[in-house]
Image: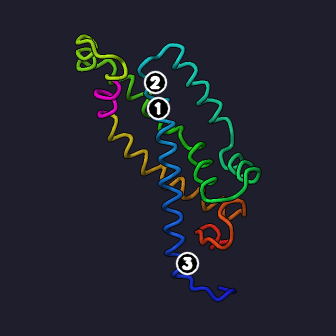
Amino acid sequence: DQVGRDYLSRLIYGTRVSITIGLGAATIGLIIGVTLGVLAGYFGGWVDHAVSFVLTAQLALPGLLLAMALVFFIGPSVIVVICIIGALHWTYFLVVTRAATQHIRSLDFVAAARASGARPRQIIWHEILPNLSSQIIVIFTFELGISILAEASLSFLGVGIQAPTPSWGLMIA
């Protein structure tokens, strides 16, 4: 490049940074989305209405613009970018786990666990979450790619990862 650095080595190191950001952000989104989705799907009622309101409010906000503003105000660093992207990308987890939990809640093995005296926490951990694992893995891989693209977009626009650290979006810029 113009400073004399090797493009291939920066691309390889930038891959490590981008994958780290993608994994961290997707994990944060997984924790938030699956927790809210399972609670809304299992309990229903006012819990479902409250979570649906939070989901609607999140979907009404433009994600990239909000991420740019938050990174600009807080300050650009790898940890801040991971936390902000993760805190903004949990909606797919919530929607899918809520719908799947509502379906699983009505099956016979959950009714049997409830009849045998299992508490809701035990039913969620031992009956519902193992049956959601395949959907969660698929959404996690999807969100991993979206998080990497969001980080590259933020870095390309100048509010993501800063100059000494190689990033795919920063290298494109």
Q: Is the residue marked by circle 1 packed among few (<14), some (14-19), or many (20+) residues within 10 Å?
A: some
Q: CA distance from mark 3 to mark 2?
A: 43 Å
Q: CA distance from mark 1 to mark 2?
A: 6 Å
Q: Residue furthest right?
A: 73
Residue 10 numbered tag: 3
Disc 3 marks a residue whose amino acid type is: Arg
Q: Is the residue marked by circle 2 packed among few (<14), some (14-19), or many (20+) residues within 10 Å?
A: many
- At mark 1, the secondary structure is helix
Disc 1 marks a residue whose amino acid type is: Thr
Q: Main secondary structure of the magenta part?
A: helix
Q: Position of residue 65 (x, y in %)?
A: 71, 48
- At mark 3, the secondary structure is helix
Q: Nearer the viewer, residue 142 or 79?
A: 79
Q: Earlier in the sequence, mark 3 or mark 2?
A: 3
Q: Which residue is mark 2?
A: 39
Identified at 53% across, 63% down, the residue is: 18
Identified at 51% across, 36% down, the residue is: 32
Disc 2 marks a residue whose amino acid type is: Leu
Q: Position of residue 134 (x, y in %)?
A: 32, 41
The residue stretch that appears in magenta: 124-131
State which quarter of the image contains the N terminus. bottom right
Q: Nearer the viewer, residue 157 or 26?
A: 26
Labels 3 and 2 touching (C-beta < 8 A): no
Q: Tell me if residue 165 comes above or below residue 34 in the rendering.
A: below
Q: Is the residue marked by circle 3 packed among few (<14), some (14-19), or many (20+) residues within 10 Å?
A: some
Q: Residue 114: within the magenta?
A: no
Quarter of image, res 72: bottom right
Labels 1 and 3 touching (C-beta < 8 A): no
Labels 1 and 2 touching (C-beta < 8 A): yes
Q: Which residue is mark 1?
A: 35
In the image: residue 133, left or right of residue 64 = left
